[in-house]
Image (cartoon, rainbow, N blue to C red):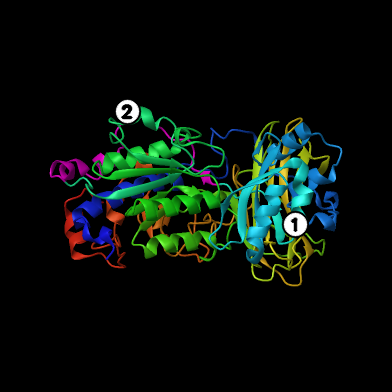
């Protein structure tokens, strides 16, 4: 018998802990301001409508990537192609493309033949590389490869693809410190605490990208002691206290609401970091709940299948409730079926518009130098991977008189092992203020694919709300949380699932304006660790004692 079931807390204890775990997840789904045309006064940059005369289709490049480098993603292939670059120049170029580079070694994810994994690892080590993590399916490796050995590693038998690891995106920076989350008063939780209902005996694992300052809050805004571990390559456990305050804020909210719960902090960055963190929480500490306010992109199809849903299912099978955020990308997403009515091989975002500006709906930002631009593209060809799209970032001058290619992602998709139907751009603006636009090119397809385009930092001129949730949020075994306006209306920034359904559990508005969070606790586990589709009688009785009236 699983000993965690022998110590199950009462339904009341579970209720207060579920409320606590939900609150930091709401922060991820509702931390963005509500943008829309015309832009709000505090919009960071000037915005303009695109002139009808602006045409960029003739400036887009053709893919000329050397097929011999198709075993690398575009950023790595571009660096390798420039054989005259120094180690410092390669480091700077890869760092600008979102890679982690340290002491002449770059962190990569390597897709391999699982039957050859041991031989591959040995060969990589012979080239001066270091493998730090292996997926449970034995087909993905994470590690560090010397910049001078990338081509040699790619030639190892059993190596399929070398690419940038998929890193997590936490919510915006949140406040943490000596303050009580307003959710405690909104839910009238203090009388529960006074009555001894504090989540005592429940173990909560919090997985995040960092917990800056958490050690200084122990015994005040956090429990006197917490258990923590770092799964980020190249870092030590004390560095859990670092990188971002986001995880600290999440932990503080959970402790404010369920002060009796035991907290376990796990710092991660990549997908394989997440795998190791989940196993540590599940097997070493037998936690009852896992909370993630993180999102990944281009890792899985977004339909509930793949490595991330598999990790959630493992936790769920062990009796763990996994709560996660839907994401904050509703206004930063475009999706649909590839359409090319004018035959120029570029997707038509709208009538006679084969690109989408970075900017609030209907507008284009005039961006200065030094602004980051991160964009992900994926499409629905995960089985055969023979449909090939490319992604381009175009820069247009402030007067719209000149447009030219600025950055691109042009991986090959021809059915070779290790390929995925994805492209990604990691870029930074430069030069005079300019407009930046995205274009999706049909390089080689035999049918019109459905694709998703996500901009991490900036809204898109053309937006599609549906299907905007991050990877992990689509996991069927997870309790995914998003924000609603009032009871029935989705707020502008809250993401929607790929199936156009509402989130399983929702809260009105943002955490800073939370009004009736407790009213949405229908379907919360009420006995053992089973999520019910209908509220139990106990939940109905409980809600009567909360401030849930409209």
Q: Residues within 10 Å of mark 1 (few under 14, many from 20)?
A: some
Q: Picture quarter containing residue 190? A: top left
Residue identifier under label 1: 156
In this rendering, position of residue 407 left or right of residue 233: right
State the separation of the CA atoms marked 1 and 2. Answer: 54 Å
Residue at position x 58%, y 49% in the image: 332
The correct choice, above or below, for 285 with respect to 342 in the image is above
Q: Residues within 10 Å of mark 2 (few under 14, many from 20)?
A: few
Residue at position x 84%, y 58% in the image: 67
Residue at position x 81%, y 34% in the image: 86
Q: Are marks 1 and 2 in contact (CB under 8 Å)?
A: no
Start-end of magenta stretch:
168-196
In this rendering, position of residue 2 left or right of residue 473: left
Q: Nearer the viewer, residue 327 or 122?
A: 122
Residue 444 location in percent, x, y? 79, 65
In this rendering, position of residue 514 left or right of residue 492: left
Residue 253 location in percent, x, y? 33, 40
Question: Can residue 296 be spotted in the picture?
Answer: no
Which mark is drawn over residue 497? none
Residue 167 location in percent, x, y? 57, 47
Residue at position x 79%, y 40% in the image: 400
Q: Nearer the viewer, residue 233 or 463?
A: 233
Residue identifier under label 2: 178
Q: Secondary structure at mark 2?
A: loop
Which of the two discs, 1 and 2, labels the residue nearer the N terminus?
1
Q: Nearer the viewer, residue 23 or 274?
A: 274
Extreme residue toward the left, this view? 195
Does the magenta segment cover residue 190? yes
Q: Secondary structure at mark 1?
A: loop
């Amino acid at each position: 018998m699983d000993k965690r079931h022998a110590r199950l807390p009462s339904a009341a204890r579970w209720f207060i802990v579920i409320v606590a775990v939900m609150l930091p997840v709401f922060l991820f789904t509702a931390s963005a301001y509500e943008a829309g045309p015309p832009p709000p006064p505090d919009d960071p940059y000037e915005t303009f409508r695109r002139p009808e005369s602006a045409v960029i289709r003739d400036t887009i490049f053709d893919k000329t990537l050397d097929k011999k480098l198709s075993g690398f993603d575009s950023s790595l292939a571009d660096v390798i192609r420039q054989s005259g670059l120094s180690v410092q120049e390669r480091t700077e170029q890869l760092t600008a493309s979102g890679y982690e580079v340290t002491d002449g070694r770059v962190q990569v994810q390597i897709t391999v033949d699982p039957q050859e994994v041991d031989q591959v690892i040995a060969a990589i080590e012979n080239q001066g590389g270091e493998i730090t993590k292996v997926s449970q399916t034995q087909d993905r490796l994470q590690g560090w490869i010397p910049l001078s050995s990338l081509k040699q590693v790619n030639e190892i038998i059993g190596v399929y693809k070398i690419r940038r690891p998929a890193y997590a995106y936490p919510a915006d920076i949140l406040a943490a410190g000596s303050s009580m989350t307003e959710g405690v008063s909104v839910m009238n939780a203090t009388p529960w605490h006074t009555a001894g209902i504090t989540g005592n005996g429940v173990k909560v694992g919090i997985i995040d990208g960092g917990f800056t300052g958490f050690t200084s809050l122990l015994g005040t805004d956090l429990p006197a002691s917490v258990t923590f571990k770092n799964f980020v390559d190249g870092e030590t456990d004390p560095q859990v206290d670092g990188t971002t305050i986001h995880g600290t804020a999440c932990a503080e909210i959970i402790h404010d609401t369920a002060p009796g719960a035991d907290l376990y902090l796990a710092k991660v960055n990549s997908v394989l970091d997440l795998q190791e963190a989940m196993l540590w929480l599940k097997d070493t500490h037998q936690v009852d709940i896992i909370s993630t306010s993180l999102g990944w992109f281009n890792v899985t199809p977004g339909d509930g299948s793949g490595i991330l849903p598999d990790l959630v299912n493992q936790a769920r099978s062990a009796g763990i409730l996994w709560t996660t955020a839907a994401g904050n990308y509703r206004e930063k997403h475009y999706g649909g079926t590839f359409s090319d009515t004018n035959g120029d091989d570029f997707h038509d975002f709208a009538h006679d518009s084969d690109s989408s500006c970075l900017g609030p709906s209907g507008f284009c930002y005039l961006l200065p130098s030094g602004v980051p631009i991160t964009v992900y593209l994926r499409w629905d060809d995960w089985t055969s991977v023979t449909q090939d799209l490319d992604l381009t970032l175009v820069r247009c001058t402030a007067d719209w008189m000149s447009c030219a290619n600025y950055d691109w992602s042009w991986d090959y998709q021809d059915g070779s092992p290790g390929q995925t139907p994805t492209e990604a751009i990691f870029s930074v603006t430069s030069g005079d203020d300019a407009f930046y636009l995205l274009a999706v090119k049909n390089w080689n397809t035999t049918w019109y694919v459905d694709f998703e385009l996500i901009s991490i930092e900036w809204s898109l001129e053309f937006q599609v709300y549906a299907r905007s949730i991050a990877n992990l949020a689509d996991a069927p075994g997870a309790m995914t949380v998003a924000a609603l306006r009032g009871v029935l209306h989705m707020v502008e920034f809250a993401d929607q699932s790929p199936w156009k359904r509402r989130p399983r559990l929702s809260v009105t508005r943002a955490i800073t304006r939370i009004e009736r969070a407790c009213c949405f606790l229908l379907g919360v586990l009420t006995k053992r660790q089973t999520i019910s589709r209908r509220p139990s009688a106990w939940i109905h009785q409980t809600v009567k004692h909360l401030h849930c009236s409209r």
